[in-house]
Image (cartoon, rainbow, N blue to C red):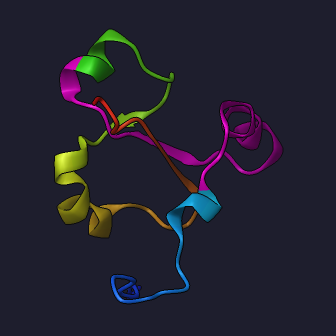
Amino acid sequence: MFELNDLTDDNDYNASDYRLNPREFFEKPRTFMRPYVYDLRSSEAHELENIPGSHNLPIENFETSIYRMPFERDIMLYGGDEG
């Protein structure tokens, strides 16, 4: 079974090291195997506008849903900062 490492106490992990700018985000699906794309915004925001083929996973459900995500391909996340 796949096991996730707990990164909460890992001082070497920095999420911004994995952040893509919009151009990199949209070029990645064309250069690698098609990733799974998750929209972390609310269901309402996802309904109004989204990246075609993305799955809605509101940020408040992210922590409990990560264990059900498919890990055989890249996973890309967007949204979640509705301020």
Q: Position of residue 2 (x, y in %)?
A: 41, 85
Q: Is residue 72 left or right of residue 21?
A: left
Identify the residue shown where x is 72% and y is 51%: 33
Return the residue nearer the eye: 12 or 35.
Answer: 12
Residue 25 lies in magenta, yes or no? Answer: yes
* Relative vertical location of residue 48 with respect to residue 29 in this rendering, above or below: above
Residue 56 lies in magenta, yes or no? Answer: no
Residue pushed farthest right?
31
* Relative vertical location of residue 25 with respect to residue 61 in this rendering, above or below: above
Q: Position of residue 44 (x, y in %)?
A: 20, 19
Return the residue nearer the eye: 12 or 44.
Answer: 12
Q: For the magenta stretch, what is the residue range?
A: 19-44
Q: Quadrant of residue 41?
A: top left
* Relative vertical location of residue 49 with respect to residue 37 in this rendering, above or below: above
Q: Position of residue 48 (x, y in %)?
A: 31, 10
| Total numbered circles | 0
Residue pushed farthest top?
48
Identify the residue shown where x is 17% and y is 49%: 60
* Relative vertical location of residue 52 with respect to residue 21 in this rendering, above or below: above
Q: Position of residue 31 (x, y in %)?
A: 82, 44
Return the residue nearer the eye: 75 or 59.
Answer: 59
Return the residue nearer the eye: 25 or 73.
Answer: 25
Identify the residue shown where x is 77% and y is 50%: 32
Q: Is residue 28 left or right of residue 2?
A: right
Q: Quadrant of residue 83?
A: top left
Quarter of the image that includes the N terminus: bottom left
